[in-house]
Amino acid sequence: MANKELAQYILEQLADLGETRCIPMMGGYIFYYRERIFGGIYDNGFLVKDTKAGRKYMPDSVAEPPYEGAKAMLPVTILEDRENFRNMVAEMYEELPERKVRKTAGDKKAEKAKKEKKEMPGKAFDYKKEYKEFYMPKNKPEIVTVPPMNYVAVRGMGDPNEPEGAYKKSIEILYAVAYAIKMSKMGQHAMDGYFDFVVPPLEGFWRQDGVDGFDISRKSAFQWISVIRLPDFVTKSELEWAKKEAWEKKKLDCSAAEFYSIEEGLCIQIMHIGSFDTEQASVDKMNRFLDENGYKNDFSEKRLHHEIYLSDARRAAPERWKTVIRHPAVKIGAD
């Protein structure tokens, strides 16, 4: 099993715990539970910290260093035993050292962006380019684990194609707030940790009552959360400032905008090329992929049909529109 596939499998085995994640490092992966490092994938396999909990659940495991000069760790011998593996990691938590500084891959990229901005004025951090795995998938289905992200969001109901409807109004609000944050650099309001960025694309979470997924033919029944991703430095209080700034500059009521956080976790996604009305063909491909690979859709009130809009519908022909379609998924037998 390749390292990437093994990392995905480990996260799936620990899905019930929540608050688990991994990051690539030196050709392998480092694993975190509640932001404390508990193990990693190295040249000699998947190992966890040598703790009392580890020895309790894996008495047959013999500690060995993951690489020359490193502290000995325990090779995991119960990976297939989902319940005991999960319990072991949960019990390990209190024995693990607390991290003094939390630096995710996003933090490091943001720091890099700030440094590059000083060295190359005018260069803004572009989420689509830095996180291609989430914004530029192939036009064939793929499984992905989506980390926590923060958004500015507006909720609503109804047909998104209504010329003066609530959905069109939500988009106006989102961009007004997003650009107020981006252009704060031009005013007197200094946001802690600010770096220049390209405003990310518009996204949407969609659901309909009584429908497992969505039915494109029933647009009036849509319940949607229209969103734009926020940089990590934007807090709830900074969002409130941006809403007031949009009102003062544009006289646009942005009170409907809210700070929205979500960790989508295990998903299936695809790049759909074409109009929104032809999305079902891409969804059918996703469903076949799930069936053939031991997964299934995992829709709920919190796990929704997700779209990311990469084309300007005002300029591109509908048959050339690019839309990321993402559905929540679960490994069969893991729910």
Image (cartoon, rainbow, N blue to C red):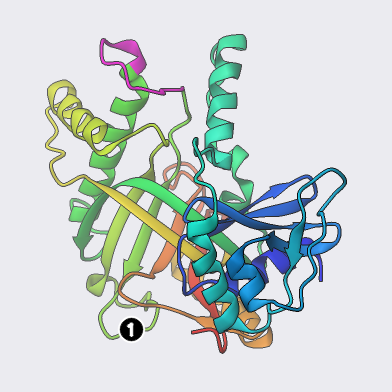
Q: Residue drawn at (68%, 86%), measured in percent from left and top?
A: 292
Q: Nearer the viewer, residue 284 or 54?
A: 54
Residue that carries the numbered disc 1 in the rendered image: 211
Q: Residue drawn at (55%, 26%), measured in percent from left and top?
A: 111
Q: Which residues are magenta?
A: 185-195
Q: Position of residue 293 (x, y in %)?
A: 68, 83
Q: Residue drawn at (20%, 28%), measured in percent from left and top?
A: 241
Q: Kindly tell me whether residue 72 is visible in this rendering.
A: yes
Q: Position of residue 195 (x, y in %)?
A: 46, 22
Quadrant hosting residue 161 = bottom left
Q: Position of residue 335 (x, y in %)?
A: 48, 84
User: Is 306 on the left-hand or right-hand side of 25?
Assistant: left
Q: Is residue 136 above or below residue 248?
A: below
Q: Is residue 190 magenta?
A: yes
Q: Nearer the viewer, residue 153 or 314?
A: 153
Q: Nearer the viewer, residue 293 or 45?
A: 45
Q: Is residue 311 magenta?
A: no
Q: Residues within 10 Å of mark 1 (few under 14, many from 20)?
A: few
**Main SS, magenta residues:** loop
Q: How many marks?
A: 1
User: Is 218 on the left-hand or right-hand side of 10?
Assistant: left
Q: Kindly tell me whether residue 324 is visible in this rendering.
A: no
Q: Secondary structure at mark 1?
A: loop
Q: Residue drawn at (37%, 44%), measured in percent from left and top?
A: 228
Quadrant hosting residue 235 = top left
Q: Position of residue 36 (x, y in %)?
A: 53, 51
Q: Nearer the viewer, residue 79 or 327?
A: 79
Q: Is residue 51 above or below residue 186?
A: below
Where is the N terminus found, in terms of image quarters?
bottom right
- Inspect the image, locate mark 1, and give the three-letter code of the amino acid beneath it: Val
Q: Is residue 117 above or below residue 203?
A: above
User: Is 280 on the left-hand or right-hand side of 252?
Assistant: right
